[in-house]
Amino acid sequence: MSDAVSALGGATWQGFATIREIGPIGMITLRAKPEVKGLAAAVKAVTGTALPAARRIVMNGEKAAGWMSPDEYLLVLPYAEVADALAALAKALAGEHHLAVDVSDARAVFRVEGTEAAQVLMKLSPVDHATLEPGELRRTRTAQVAAAFWKDDTGYTVVSFRSVAGYVMGLLQHSAQKGSELF
Protein backbone atom coordinates (compact mmCIF):
# COMPACT_ATOMS: atom_id res chain seq x y z
CA MET A 1 0.00 0.00 0.00
CA SER A 2 1.36 3.41 -0.88
CA ASP A 3 1.42 6.37 1.46
CA ALA A 4 -1.29 8.97 0.98
CA VAL A 5 -0.17 12.27 -0.49
CA SER A 6 -1.97 15.55 -0.94
CA ALA A 7 -2.92 16.68 -4.43
CA LEU A 8 -0.21 19.36 -4.73
CA GLY A 9 2.38 18.13 -2.24
CA GLY A 10 1.62 20.82 0.33
CA ALA A 11 2.06 23.79 -2.00
CA THR A 12 2.08 27.22 -0.36
CA TRP A 13 1.97 30.78 -1.62
CA GLN A 14 2.21 34.14 0.09
CA GLY A 15 0.41 37.23 -1.15
CA PHE A 16 -1.75 39.57 0.89
CA ALA A 17 -3.12 36.27 2.27
CA THR A 18 -1.37 32.95 2.80
CA ILE A 19 -2.55 30.06 0.62
CA ARG A 20 -1.67 26.52 1.70
CA GLU A 21 -2.71 23.18 0.32
CA ILE A 22 -3.20 20.88 3.30
CA GLY A 23 -3.69 17.19 3.52
CA PRO A 24 -4.10 14.41 3.17
CA ILE A 25 -7.23 14.78 5.24
CA GLY A 26 -9.81 12.08 5.84
CA MET A 27 -13.28 12.83 4.50
CA ILE A 28 -16.44 10.78 4.51
CA THR A 29 -19.59 11.68 2.64
CA LEU A 30 -22.49 10.44 4.73
CA ARG A 31 -25.89 10.37 3.07
CA ALA A 32 -28.83 9.95 5.46
CA LYS A 33 -31.96 11.85 6.35
CA PRO A 34 -31.64 13.63 9.71
CA GLU A 35 -34.38 11.48 11.24
CA VAL A 36 -32.50 8.21 10.61
CA LYS A 37 -32.38 6.30 13.89
CA GLY A 38 -28.94 6.50 15.46
CA LEU A 39 -27.54 9.07 13.02
CA ALA A 40 -26.67 11.73 15.61
CA ALA A 41 -25.03 9.15 17.88
CA ALA A 42 -23.05 7.67 14.97
CA VAL A 43 -21.73 11.09 13.92
CA LYS A 44 -20.83 11.90 17.52
CA ALA A 45 -18.99 8.57 17.90
CA VAL A 46 -16.90 9.24 14.77
CA THR A 47 -16.25 13.00 15.09
CA GLY A 48 -17.04 13.88 18.68
CA THR A 49 -19.48 16.51 17.42
CA ALA A 50 -23.20 16.99 17.27
CA LEU A 51 -25.07 16.61 14.01
CA PRO A 52 -24.65 20.02 12.33
CA ALA A 53 -27.54 22.35 11.60
CA ALA A 54 -28.21 23.50 8.04
CA ARG A 55 -25.23 25.31 6.45
CA ARG A 56 -23.06 24.77 9.55
CA ILE A 57 -19.91 22.85 10.41
CA VAL A 58 -19.19 21.71 13.95
CA MET A 59 -15.50 21.41 14.83
CA ASN A 60 -13.78 19.22 17.41
CA GLY A 61 -10.01 19.59 17.04
CA GLU A 62 -8.98 17.77 13.83
CA LYS A 63 -12.49 16.38 13.42
CA ALA A 64 -15.64 18.01 12.12
CA ALA A 65 -19.13 17.33 10.81
CA GLY A 66 -20.55 19.63 8.16
CA TRP A 67 -24.02 19.96 6.63
CA MET A 68 -23.83 19.70 2.84
CA SER A 69 -27.53 19.27 1.92
CA PRO A 70 -30.75 18.09 3.60
CA ASP A 71 -29.54 14.47 3.51
CA GLU A 72 -25.76 14.81 3.20
CA TYR A 73 -23.00 15.41 5.72
CA LEU A 74 -19.25 15.81 5.34
CA LEU A 75 -17.27 14.15 8.11
CA VAL A 76 -13.67 15.36 8.43
CA LEU A 77 -11.11 13.42 10.44
CA PRO A 78 -7.48 12.35 10.35
CA TYR A 79 -6.75 10.34 7.20
CA ALA A 80 -5.62 7.26 9.14
CA GLU A 81 -8.96 7.05 10.99
CA VAL A 82 -11.25 6.80 7.94
CA ALA A 83 -11.45 2.98 7.72
CA ASP A 84 -12.33 2.65 11.42
CA ALA A 85 -14.86 5.48 11.12
CA LEU A 86 -16.57 3.78 8.16
CA ALA A 87 -16.77 0.52 10.13
CA ALA A 88 -18.23 2.36 13.13
CA LEU A 89 -20.82 4.11 10.94
CA ALA A 90 -21.81 0.82 9.27
CA LYS A 91 -22.27 -0.84 12.66
CA ALA A 92 -24.15 2.08 14.24
CA LEU A 93 -26.45 2.54 11.23
CA ALA A 94 -26.97 -1.15 10.33
CA GLY A 95 -30.47 -1.66 8.99
CA GLU A 96 -31.01 2.07 8.45
CA HIS A 97 -31.11 3.72 5.03
CA HIS A 98 -27.73 5.46 4.62
CA LEU A 99 -24.57 5.59 2.54
CA ALA A 100 -21.08 6.33 3.88
CA VAL A 101 -18.23 6.69 1.40
CA ASP A 102 -14.53 7.53 1.79
CA VAL A 103 -13.92 10.56 -0.45
CA SER A 104 -10.54 11.50 1.06
CA ASP A 105 -8.52 10.81 -2.07
CA ALA A 106 -11.03 12.58 -4.31
CA ARG A 107 -10.66 15.94 -2.56
CA ALA A 108 -8.07 18.70 -2.27
CA VAL A 109 -8.09 20.96 0.77
CA PHE A 110 -6.68 24.48 1.07
CA ARG A 111 -6.28 27.06 3.83
CA VAL A 112 -6.61 30.77 3.10
CA GLU A 113 -5.32 32.77 6.06
CA GLY A 114 -4.53 36.32 7.06
CA THR A 115 -6.36 39.50 7.94
CA GLU A 116 -7.55 39.92 4.34
CA ALA A 117 -8.32 36.25 3.62
CA ALA A 118 -11.98 37.03 2.90
CA GLN A 119 -10.96 39.20 -0.06
CA VAL A 120 -9.43 36.18 -1.78
CA LEU A 121 -12.73 34.29 -1.77
CA MET A 122 -14.88 37.38 -2.39
CA LYS A 123 -13.45 37.55 -5.89
CA LEU A 124 -14.10 33.89 -6.63
CA SER A 125 -17.40 32.86 -5.04
CA PRO A 126 -20.95 34.24 -5.18
CA VAL A 127 -21.29 34.40 -1.39
CA ASP A 128 -22.13 37.37 0.82
CA HIS A 129 -18.93 37.31 2.87
CA ALA A 130 -20.12 40.21 5.03
CA THR A 131 -22.68 37.89 6.60
CA LEU A 132 -20.61 34.68 6.60
CA GLU A 133 -20.10 33.62 10.21
CA PRO A 134 -17.43 31.39 11.71
CA GLY A 135 -18.73 27.82 11.57
CA GLU A 136 -20.91 28.49 8.54
CA LEU A 137 -20.30 26.08 5.67
CA ARG A 138 -21.04 27.16 2.12
CA ARG A 139 -21.32 24.73 -0.77
CA THR A 140 -20.82 26.88 -3.82
CA ARG A 141 -18.31 27.38 -6.59
CA THR A 142 -14.90 28.92 -6.85
CA ALA A 143 -14.79 30.54 -10.29
CA GLN A 144 -15.89 27.67 -12.56
CA VAL A 145 -15.59 24.65 -10.24
CA ALA A 146 -17.54 23.20 -7.35
CA ALA A 147 -16.19 23.96 -3.90
CA ALA A 148 -17.16 24.16 -0.28
CA PHE A 149 -15.63 26.38 2.36
CA TRP A 150 -16.00 27.43 5.94
CA LYS A 151 -14.66 30.26 8.04
CA ASP A 152 -12.94 29.98 11.39
CA ASP A 153 -10.97 32.36 13.60
CA THR A 154 -7.81 32.31 11.44
CA GLY A 155 -9.20 32.07 7.90
CA TYR A 156 -11.00 29.69 5.58
CA THR A 157 -10.80 26.03 4.68
CA VAL A 158 -11.61 25.39 1.02
CA VAL A 159 -12.46 21.92 -0.35
CA SER A 160 -12.51 21.10 -4.05
CA PHE A 161 -12.25 18.04 -6.24
CA ARG A 162 -8.69 16.73 -6.44
CA SER A 163 -8.88 16.71 -10.24
CA VAL A 164 -9.01 20.53 -10.27
CA ALA A 165 -6.56 21.16 -7.41
CA GLY A 166 -4.01 22.93 -9.63
CA TYR A 167 -6.70 25.17 -11.09
CA VAL A 168 -8.06 26.07 -7.64
CA MET A 169 -4.56 26.77 -6.28
CA GLY A 170 -3.93 29.04 -9.28
CA LEU A 171 -7.21 30.87 -8.67
CA LEU A 172 -6.42 31.39 -5.00
CA GLN A 173 -2.88 32.58 -5.79
CA HIS A 174 -4.04 35.03 -8.44
CA SER A 175 -6.80 36.32 -6.19
CA ALA A 176 -4.30 36.88 -3.33
CA GLN A 177 -1.80 38.87 -5.42
CA LYS A 178 -0.93 42.31 -4.20
CA GLY A 179 -2.59 44.85 -6.42
CA SER A 180 -5.66 42.69 -6.94
CA GLU A 181 -7.44 43.75 -3.73
CA LEU A 182 -11.09 44.67 -4.06
CA PHE A 183 -10.68 48.01 -2.31
Image: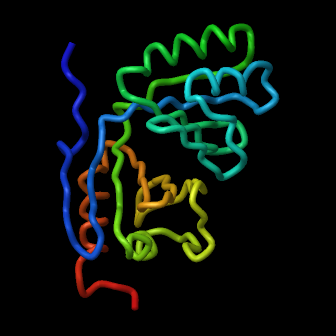
Front-most of residues 131 and 97: 131
Is residue 96 shown left or right of residue 65? Answer: right
Q: Tell me where residue 83 appears, x and y as whole percent.
A: 43, 15
Picture colour scheme: rainbow
Q: Tell me where residue 40 appears, x and y as whole percent.
A: 72, 27
The quadrant of the picture occupied by the N terminus is top left
Task: Decide: is 90 above or below 19.
Answer: above
Is residue 151 shown left or right of residue 48? Answer: left
Tell me the residue at 61%/21% (across/down): 45
The image quadrant of residue 175 is bottom left
Front-most of residues 145 and 26: 26
Task: Decide: is 93 above or below 103.
Answer: above
Is residue 154 shown left or right of residue 36? Answer: left
The image quadrant of residue 170 is bottom left
Tell me the residue at 73%/18% (across/down): 97
The image quadrant of residue 169 is bottom left
Q: Tell me where residue 119 appears, x and y as whole percent.
A: 41, 76
The quadrant of the picture occupied by the C terminus is bottom left
Tell me the residue at 52%/16% (across/down): 86
Q: Tell me where residue 58 appears, x and y as whole percent.
A: 60, 43
Q: Residue furthest bottom?
A: 183
Front-most of residues 113 and 129: 113
The mark tally for this picture is: 0
Tell me the residue at 31%/50% (across/down): 164
